[in-house]
Amino acid sequence: MAAKGVAICGIGVVSGYGWGREALWDGLMSGKPAATVVSGLGQHPGDEVWAACVSDAGNPADGPSRFARAMRAAAREAIGDAGDRGWQPGRRVGLLHAVVLGEVDLWRDFYRARGGALPMRDYLAMMPSTPMSTVMQEYGFHGPAMNVSAMCASGNAGLITAKSWLDAGIVDDVVFVATDLSLTPENVSHFVRLGVAIVDAEPLDACRPFQSGSRGFIMGEASVAFVLSSRAERPYALTLGGAMSHDAYHVTSIDPDLGQITGCFQDALANAGVPASAVRYLNAHGPGTVQCDRAEAAVLDHLFPANTEVYSVKPLTGHCQGAASAVEVAVTALGYDRGLVPAPPVVATGHPRLLDGPSRITDGITIKSSLGMGGHNSAVVLAPPA
């Protein structure tokens, strides 16, 4: 039996392209990466690196950090967008916030510059409960509020959790936000040392998912918000179902037999009540690393029919870490609404099913995969609105 779809009826985005979902869409459609050459994130003073950072903007009243201001702005844009599209909040509106590394700028300053000495108000601003509390207060929401964390799969984890809340009748609606503004010199350096982040080359030269010559990913930042409801008037997309699993194999590497990843895709399809033959697009994790791209290509070839096409927007948005899959779900939802898949340009020999640049969308199911470091597998099944 097919699962009941939960509608994505509002979207808000802060990304390396700018503040707002239209900045994201316009940037993707341009085919130009969000990353620029940034000073101050390198291992040594004066080093310059390629990264897709969120600018220091937003409303200062929303908090002392880029993290707080971006989270509030994304949530506010999504809630306003949903209202414009006919959504009326129910009595129990829940909030989920996907966070892996929160308020890194404030914590870095707390230890390195302030020596732990802060006014109580500033200390409370660093708590993971504070951004959620401020959103709940602003809108008078009284449903459950909690954080979700599953590394790069956190966005998918949040959507699956939101749908489970709605299906179980725990809430009437959910505001889901995923925020990751964690690019500091220390964090960038360690991802470079892991051999997965590339900082010394233009994005399309370095990050080429499912293409020859790919070296890894360019790091990015984002905050992305959705309003999810079973009572939406004009939804962008439907979340039909999803699944998560864990490799239980290694802290960074994928189990080479791919059993858990393949099973996760199959469980997601079963949960959504959708056959593999109905899947038209794989919106892949696609970070441009050898092991991840090889794994997803193997699943694509094994499970899905010849007309299922694949793409990854990480060459354009950067890898936004804990917010990555949320950015990529927003891409699918906006694409259904606007009739286009904003795929990056193909720049090298690649998989025969890889989309090349913005492509007219055909009605069909999208499966959004996300593979989090440490063994987190996830897949969410999305459909155009009925």
Image: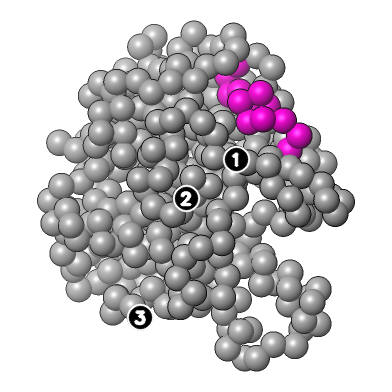
- Which image quarter is the C terminus in? top left
Looking at the rendered image, the disc whose residue lies closer to the viewer, 3 or 2, is 2
Amino acid bearing label 3: Gln
Question: Coloring scheme of the render?
Answer: one colour
- Which image quarter is the N terminus in? top left
Of all residues shown, which one is farthest toward the right?
44
Q: Who comes first in sequence, dot 3 or dot 1?
A: 1
Magenta-drawn stretch contains 233: no
- Residue ID at (67%, 67%): 105
Q: Position of residue 131 (x, y in %)?
A: 48, 73
- Residue 191 visible: no
**Alpha carbons under labels 1 and 2: distance apart:** 11 Å
Q: Main secondary structure of the magenta part?
A: loop
Q: Between residues 376 and 25, which one lies in front from this camera angle?
A: 25
Question: Is 45 placed left or right of 331 in the picture?
Answer: right
- Residue ID at (35%, 36%): 332
- Residue ID at (20%, 46%): 235
**Secondary element at image label 3:** helix
**Magenta part of the chain:** 199-211
**Alpha carbons under labels 3 and 1: distance apart:** 34 Å
**Alpha carbons under labels 3 and 2: distance apart:** 26 Å
**Secondary element at image label 2:** strand
- Circle 2 sits on which residue? 18
Magenta-drawn stretch contains 204: yes
- Residue 104 visible: yes
Q: Position of residue 200 (x, y in %)?
A: 76, 34
Q: Who comes first in sequence, dot 3 or dot 2?
A: 2
Amino acid bearing label 1: Ala
92 versus 321 height, above or below: below
Looking at the rendered image, the disc whose residue lies closer to the viewer, 3 or 1, is 1
**Secondary element at image label 1:** loop
Q: Position of residue 230 (x, y in %)?
A: 19, 53
